[in-house]
Amino acid sequence: MNAYERPVLGVSSCLLGAPVRYNGGHSRYRFLTDELDRHVDWLPICPETEIGLGVPRPTLRLQDSDGAGRVISSADGADRTDELAGVADQHLKQLRRLDGYVLKNKSPSCGLFALPVFDDNGDLARGTGRGAFADRLTRLLPNLPVEEQGRLSDAVLREHFAERVFAHARLRALLEGDWTARDLVEFHTRHKLQLMAHSPDGYRETGRIVARAGLEDLEGVGASYGEAFRRTLAVKSSRGKHANVLQHAFGMISPRLDDARRHDLLAEIETYRRGDAPLSLPIALLRHHCAAEDVAWANEQSYLRPYPDSLRLRHPVAV
């Protein structure tokens, strides 16, 4: 797989450098603008400016109201919750075609995790909340890969997010086209190792759906497969799962290797399993041997090339 479908990602406008923050500034995030930008298309949205709030503008805060978080203006106490949530509904047709979304953290409209909640006096209340737009977005599209800026600094979360959005793009390209049962079988075969690396149960579930492709209505099969595929890739992988998949791949190429190369590849997999090497090393060695031996299946396995190599996301030892 040398070609990649271009994911379409929603994004908080300020993260791409748009000066739309409350203070007239931006929060440009270089991973998005300098690395991911060349590989994806963007749908920038600033919910606060879309509901008519100016730049600069009074700050908003998440305030407790009978156990529910409401977005309140610090200037006049106006409740902006429903307006901000409604922006997601206004863009729903576009949002349904997205392959992922990156939100601004700590934002009362876009914050996804652990947003502070205040009481009527402006003091911190118990618990945390979620921004109004972010909450509505994730309710409307529960299987959409969504992350916030701050968490993408974590190497494991960043790699998982990128893997999911490129897989979503490939799935979208399949299901939006004039596909056949055979096309679905081929798609599933290409994603076998990738699905196994996240959830063996999910791999088996998607396989059972594919087996029905020639017997049932294709539209219904496609919807069921898409749901199971996205849910499976949402499960976080682990060092142990990756090592098991690498062992599985090793078993497929082992008959073509001599003893020295088999030993080297197994040793590299074990070094990764122990946490002493990044995932990129056994992957690179496996790809090298597959290329040398002209192993056709390796060029088709999404697990070995889940996204463009230039993103360098499997190099940290933490992954």
Image: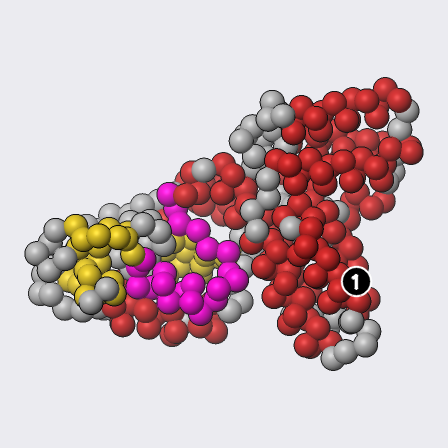
Neighbourhood count class around disc 1 (C-alpha, 10 Å): few under 14, some 14–19, many 20 upward: some
Residue at x 78% of width, y 39% of height: 249
SS at badge 1 = helix
Residue type marked 1: Val
Residue at x 65% of width, y 29% of height: 273
Query: Where residue 159 sits: x, y (%)?
Result: 54, 42
Q: Is residue 142 magenta?
A: yes
The residue wearing badge 1 is 185
Say which of 33 and 313 sits in front.
313
Quick check: 60 left or right of 276?
left
Give the mark count.
1
Quick check: 260 left or right of 90?
right
Residue at x 23% of width, y 64% of height: 67
Note whether 276 is above or below 63 in the view shown.
above
Which quarter of the image is occupied by the C terminus? top right
Would you identify the image quadrant in which residue 292 lies?
Answer: top right
Query: Where residue 38 sits: x, y (%)?
Result: 53, 46
Part of the protein shown in magenta: 130-150
Say which of 314 and 204 sits in front.
204
